[in-house]
Structure formats: C-alpha cells, structure tokens
Image (cartoon, grey):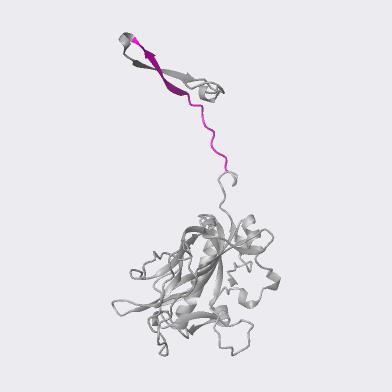
Amino acid sequence: MSFLPSPDHPLGTDLWTDDLQALIKSRANIRELQQWECFPTSLTQLVEWATVAQHPTCTDRRRSHLIIYKTLPVPEPCGVLYPVSVRIYSFLDKFCVGEFGNWTGDCAKAAYAVQSLSISGTRNTIAWRNQLECLNLAATFASHVLKIPLPAKQFRGHVHMQRKVFTKDLHPPDDQVTPPVNSAPQNAHLPKLPDYPWVWNGPVKILECNRDGTISPIHKVLLSQGHFVEIDAEFDLVVVRTHTSRTHLRVFLTCKQILHLQSARSVQASGTAWPPSSYTEIKRMRANATTDDHHGTLQFSLVPCEPGCPSSSQVPGSFAE
C-alpha cells in the first residue's frame, strides 16, 4: 500500500489533528519508506512511478485495465502485475461489510453481491481534500494513458467504494467438463455459499490496530459510524460507452481492507460540555378516593415536588401516592 502525501509530509500527517497524526505516523517509519510506498504528487512523477496495463484474465472489456506499480523492488520480468493500492484515512460513514455483502442467499435473484462503504472527512476538511486531490491525480493519469476523457472530477465530497463478494463466471475454461461444486464447510448460522457459476472472491478484511502496534482481525459488529480508519483501496477503471456512442472513463475504488484506528469520540470526551439545564418544577397526579353513597369517586389534585427533595418513590419503605 502507498501513502497519500501532502506537499510537506510523505504521510500527509501535517494536515490532521495531533491525535490523528500520531495514529498515522505509527503505521510507518518515514525513514524506511521505499519509493513505491510514496504516492506521487504530479503527473510527471506518476509516469515514472506507475503505468496502466491490460488485465491478463479479465473477460469484461470495460474493466480490462489496471494501474500497476513500476517501481517495485522485484526482478524483471517476473510475470506478475501488482495493482497500485493506496492508504486512505477517514471517518466511516455508511457501510455494509458483512461477509456476504448484500446477498440474501437466493442465487436465482442475485444480480450481484457486494460489500460497500462510504467515508468522509467532515472533521478534517483540509486533510480530506488533500487525499481527494491525490485520488483525482491517479484518475487523470489513467485518462491520459488510455486517451479516454473523464466526464468530470471523479472524487469529491464523500467517497463510496465497493468490493465484489461473488462474481459470475460466464466464460468457463474449455477443458472444464463438469462445473465445480463448492465443498467448503458451511456455518449453520450463515447462508449457503453459492455453487458454480458463482465464484467466491473473499470478503473485505476487517482489522484493528492494538495499543502495542500489533494488528488483529475483528468482527464487523465492532465497527461503527464515526470510527477513524485506514482503508486499503485499489483503483477500478471502467470504460463507459454512452447511448450516443461516446466513450469516457470512470474511476472507482475497490476496498480490500479496513483497519480500525480510533473509535468515534463521544461529545463529552471531545471537550464539549452539556448545556446547563434550568430547574423545572415537577407535579404529579394523586388520586383521592371518597365513598359517598358507596360509589367510589376519584378526585385528582396536583402535588408539587419540592426542589432537591426525593419523591416518595425514592424513599425506602414508602410508597408513591
């Protein structure tokens, strides 16, 4: 994964608040960063740092391109493509990151199965805008390389990203005589994994950074709106042809991993005091029973509760009137 820098810091930490700076700095030693871990700040640098390559196995021509690293310390040629992935720091907004995404368990009705999440930087506008500029720089780079225009700025405001949990294999290999059957063990509390032609891609990894710096997996229920997280995301290039036969490029993000760094702060923990409340008199209704002519009649009267005095229901051994 590569860090998105600011003009004055390779990790972009100078634009965040002090507490969040410490969390981001704990993720890497800037003195040991390699070239591929530092996302470029200009198109000129991007040309030397990355390139756009044809996906070797993708059968969907609309999604047949990848932004890949050029500066990885691997021997050439190695026959392996490494897609560029970036670390995005933000606050969780809405998310659906269950192991089966939005799938209900009915393969006959499933058009797709995805996990999704949206993030924003409403609490740190400057740092968030800096990250958006880096993401838009990558989109502009891909547009120039493919010579396909972008319809508009791709990343602005909230960022929504997805990950496909299942994909449908529409073009099986010629030597595949019988469709494969999913023999993975099943959990009685989870929907049955679909068989061919659905292909399991695996869910988003959900992790937590412990106080000692170690990383451990956590359950999705421990995530909540407002948590500060590190997102590992790849660029998804989609070539779109409109009904007027015009072609343009759309750039999305595919989430691979969520690393929880800090829980959402409560109002009181952030230093905001609750507003003082003025005294409000409390009056209770009391029923007085009379027995005139042997007919019970209820008469109600207002009984004020004195300031600072407990009600009768709060006094041990007594009953509320």
Residue occupying the far left of the picture: 244
Q: How many marks?
A: 0
Give the residue displayed 44% in from the left and 22% down from the top. 284
Q: Quadrant of the N terminus?
A: bottom right
Residue 7 falls left or right of residue 109: right
Image quadrant of residue 178?
bottom left
Q: Is residue 156 visible?
A: no
**Is 96 rendered above or below residue 35?**
above
| Residue 291: image location, x then y, percent | 35, 11
Point out residue 169 in the picture as x, y percentages from the top left corner.
40, 80
- Magenta span contains residue 289: yes
Residue at 30%, 80% in the rendered image: 245
User: What residue is at 45 percent from the left and 78 percent from the top?
Assistant: 143
The answer to whether residue 304 of the structure is visible from this angle is yes
Q: Is residue 28 above or below residue 83?
A: above
Q: Between residues 132 and 107, which one lies in front from this camera angle?
A: 107
- Give 21 or 193, whichever is nearer the viewer: 193
Question: Where 220 falls versus 298 (above or below)?
Answer: below
Which of 265 and 32 lies nearest the eye of the viewer? 265
Please, which residue is most extreme toward the right here? 31
Highlighted magenta segment, given as a residue range: 272-291
Query: Residue 79's image quarter?
Result: bottom right
In front of the other: 165 or 71: 165
Taking 202 as reference, is 76 left or right?
right
Percent x, y of residue 297: 33, 15
Is residue 245 shown above or below 102? below
The stretch drawn in magenta includes residue 70: no
Q: Position of residue 41 (x, y in %)?
A: 57, 73
